[in-house]
Amino acid sequence: MSIEIKPSQALDLWRIAIVESVRRDSPDLSARQMALLLNVYLTQAPHTVRGLSEALNISKPAITRALDRLSSLGMVKRKVDEEDRRSVLIQRTVKGSVFLREFGDIIVSAGKETE
């Protein structure tokens, strides 16, 4: 069963969730960083800079900059691929999982506010 949501309702849900997220004492991620983080956590691994660049249709240097920030926050980590030492794998972390679970909770709460 699908629920029909109007664009204005979707935007209001997003507004409420974003406002709540910036009020919390948690990292304030850019849209690019959030898209990258969601892609790493919600799509099938393994993840590489090249694969993420293709999936998001943005340049590899842009992926690298976003990964630098997410790595510094402890939300992802880089690991050399043991099968192909030229490749670096992007891995999930507990801190990143907790951040996204809490962000998901914010979205659920925002959904209840818009009902």
Image: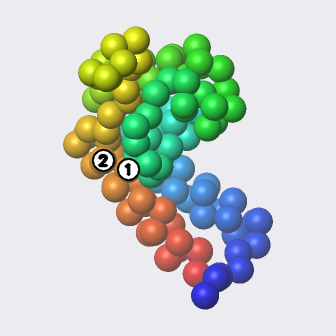
Q: Is residue 112 visible?
A: yes
Q: Locate residue 59: give its quadrant.
A: top right
Tell me, yes or no, if residue 73 can be seen here: no
Dot 1 lies on which element? helix
Distance CA(mark 2)–CA(mark 1): 5 Å
**Mark 1 crowd level (few <14, some 14–19, many ≥20, 10 Å Cα):** some
Nearer to me, 34 or 18: 34
> Cβ–Cβ below 8 Å for labels 2 and 1?
yes
- Corner quadrant of residue 73: top left
- Image x and y of residue 77, in percent: 30, 27
The percent position of residue 92, horizontal first and vertical second, equals 31, 38
Q: Which residue is mark 1?
A: 100
Return the residue at label 2.
97
Identify the amino acid type marked 1.
Answer: Leu
Residue 28 higher or lower than 58, as above or below = below
Query: What residue lies at 55% left-to-right and 24% top-to-bottom?
Result: 50
Q: Is residue 91 above or below residue 41?
A: above
Name the quadrant of the C terminus.
bottom right
User: For the N terminus, which image quadrant?
Assistant: bottom right
Point 67% across, 65% down: residue: 10
